[in-house]
Structure formats: structure tokens, C-alpha cells
Image (cartoon, grey):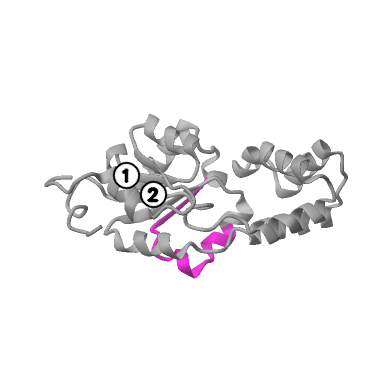
Amino acid sequence: MGDAGILGGVTKWLMLDYGGVVCHHQSEEVRAELVRLAGVDAAAFWAAFWGHRLPYDAGEVSAAGYWRTVAGTVGASWADEHCADLTRIDIGGWLRPNEDVLRVARESGLRLALLSNAPAELARAVRGLDWMAPFERLLFSCDLGTTKPDARCYRDALAQLGAEPHEVIFVDDRQENVDGARAVGIRAALLTDGARLDEVLSEVLGPASPGR
């Protein structure tokens, strides 16, 4: 995918999700370590982990408050130090860059932005990563106070970018988040495991044409 079909047209921003797009999902080793520390059934742990995640991502509860809620759901009781260890391992597991995605993003000729459902601890870690330097704007749900796929999240992101919906392409690894972006007029695409970002962008942009 060359720059000629993008530059000078209406598309100005490439906005990417973080987990599962810009970075790889947590490894099996990290996931196993979280379950080991939790000391509960794995299926119950992950159901509670994701089931209570959005308020944490939205900045409505602290890390300790999130883990206490997870613990209550799975019938466990974790001290603050234990919650801190879970937070450290959880956040550390989301810091493996997807080099192929980052390369295509850099070569796209578009301004780069991030829109991620992420708690404050992860947002702080991501902001300190050297390989995130090409991104002009790092937008996190914990700062916006709302999460994908809520329409407010996308509208707030557009406002932060100073962009109209048609000027942005958004890529996420969850269909509900792609659908949420499309609902507010953003061109959005799903990046599945093993898919190439350049192919996904080509499908969204279509054949090169003047004024795109």
C-alpha cells in the first residue's frame, strides 16, 4: 500500500486500538501467572477479570478496587500487596509491541492516534514506551471517562483529534468496537489474529482514486 492513494485526500488519521493491535495480547505465561497468583479456577478468574474491567478502564475505580471486586466475585480475599502484584503482572503483560502493525502504521502516510480501553496504570506505562513515539495522540478511556464501544468514546476521540468522522480510519481487534466506531461515521476495520494491517487498510480505503 503506497502513500499516494492516502496523502492529500480526506483521510487524515489512522487511529488504532492498543491491546491486540499495536501490542500483542498477554502471553500464555503471563495469563498463567495471573491465575496462579489469584489462586482460583481459571475460567472463573477470567470471567470476573473481563466482567468487571470496563469501570476500571473508565477510571471509575482504582486498581485495588477493581481487584477487590474480582476477588469478591470468585470467592477470594486479596490483601493490598497481593492486588499490587496482580496489577504489576497484568500491566506488564501488555507491553509487547506488534512490530508489523507499527511498521505499516508508520509507512501509511497518515497521522497516528491511539484509542484504547485502558486503566490509568496501563496508560502511564504506554506513554513511557519509546516505540509509541510516532503516535501524535494517545487517547485512553481512563482519561476520557468512557469506554469503547460507547458512542461518546469515539466522539470524544474525534474532538481530541479535531477531526470529522470521515477523516479517520479506526482499527480494533473486537467487532463490537469496530461496530461502535462505524455507528458514529468512522470508517473502521477488524484486525483479526494473523491478519496484516496493510491488507486491512487497503480493504477500507478501496481502490486509489483522486480526492480520497
- Does 134 lie within the magenta span? yes
> What's the magenta region?
124-140
Task: Assess whether mark 2 and mark 1 are in contact (beta carbons under 8 angstroms).
Answer: yes
| Dot 2 alpha-carbon crowd within 10 angstroms: few under 14, some 14 to 19, many 20 or more | many
Corner quadrant of residue 25: bottom right
- Residue 176 at x, y = what percent? 49, 34
Up/down of 80 relative to 175, above or below: below
Distance from label 1 to label 2 (Cα)? 7 Å
Corner quadrant of residue 159: top left
Q: Is residue 31 visible?
A: yes
Up/down of 211 relative to 110, above or below: above
What amino acid type is highlighted by mark number 1? Val
Q: Which label sits on residue 15?
A: 2
- Does 68 lie within the magenta span? no
Q: Which label sits on residue 168?
A: 1
| Dot 1 alpha-carbon crowd within 10 angstroms: few under 14, some 14 to 19, many 20 or more | many
The residue drawn where x is 54% and y is 52% is: 19
- Residue 79 at x, y = what percent? 86, 51
The residue drawn where x is 35% and y is 49% is: 200
What amino acid type is highlighted by mark number 2? Met
The residue drawn where x is 59% and y is 58% is: 94
Q: Is residue 60 visible?
A: no
Give the mark nearest the N terminus, 1 or 2. 2
Report helix, strand or loop for mark 1.
Answer: strand
Nearer to me, 156 or 135: 135
Report helix, strand or loop for mark 2.
Answer: strand
Nearer to me, 189 or 154: 189
The residue drawn where x is 33% and y is 45% is: 169
Q: Is residue 45 left or right of residue 93?
A: right
